[in-house]
Amino acid sequence: YNGFGKVFDKNYLGNSDKLAATIREVLENKKYGENARRISHMLAKKPFSSREKLIKTVEFAAEFGPFSALRPQSLDMNFIEYNNIDIITAGFTVTAVVVLFLYKSIGFALRKCLASKS
């Protein structure tokens, strides 16, 4: 929220009174106009215009060509690697082995304990 406008829920677009009141508030309240002028001034004075950014990007691409360091590694991954299915499968396998080991160990200990009491 930058203070140069007011949020209006799209579900109330059918309510003309509420819409008119919101528009009237934005137009009549001086703080919205002042903030809009402040943001406008900031945008006019920003360090690089969109045109300058485009020119710099095109010059960079022309000078250095395709830059592999800026290429996302995800483009070289298959579906399983990209979605970490291999890691999830390994985690489930380790968890299942540990649970099975604990289950068997507790069962063995209970059998020994019950067998020694009989």
Image: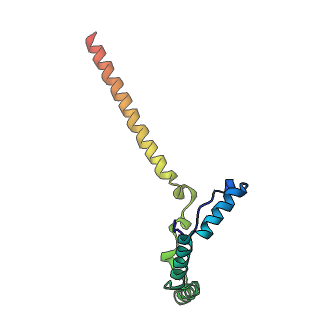
96, above or below 51, in the image: above
The residue located at (65%, 60%) in the rendering is 21
Q: Position of residue 101 (x, y in %)?
A: 37, 33
Q: Position of residue 99 (x, y in %)?
A: 40, 34
Nearest the viewer among 5 and 60 is 5
The residue located at (30%, 15%) in the rendering is 114
Colouring scheme applied when the structure was drawn: rainbow
Nearest the viewer among 75 and 43 is 43
The residue located at (48%, 47%) in the rendering is 89
User: In the figure, residue 100 lies in which quadrant?
Assistant: top left
Is residue 42 toward the left or the right of residue 18 in the image? left
User: In the figure, residue 115 lies in which quadrant?
Assistant: top left
Q: Residue furthest left?
A: 116
Looking at the rendering, in which quadrant would you find the C terminus? Answer: top left
How many marks are shown on the rendered structure? 0
Q: Position of residue 94 (x, y in %)?
A: 41, 43
Q: Position of residue 11 (x, y in %)?
A: 68, 53
12, above or below 56, in the image: above
Nearest the viewer among 95 and 44 is 44
80, above or below 105, in the image: below
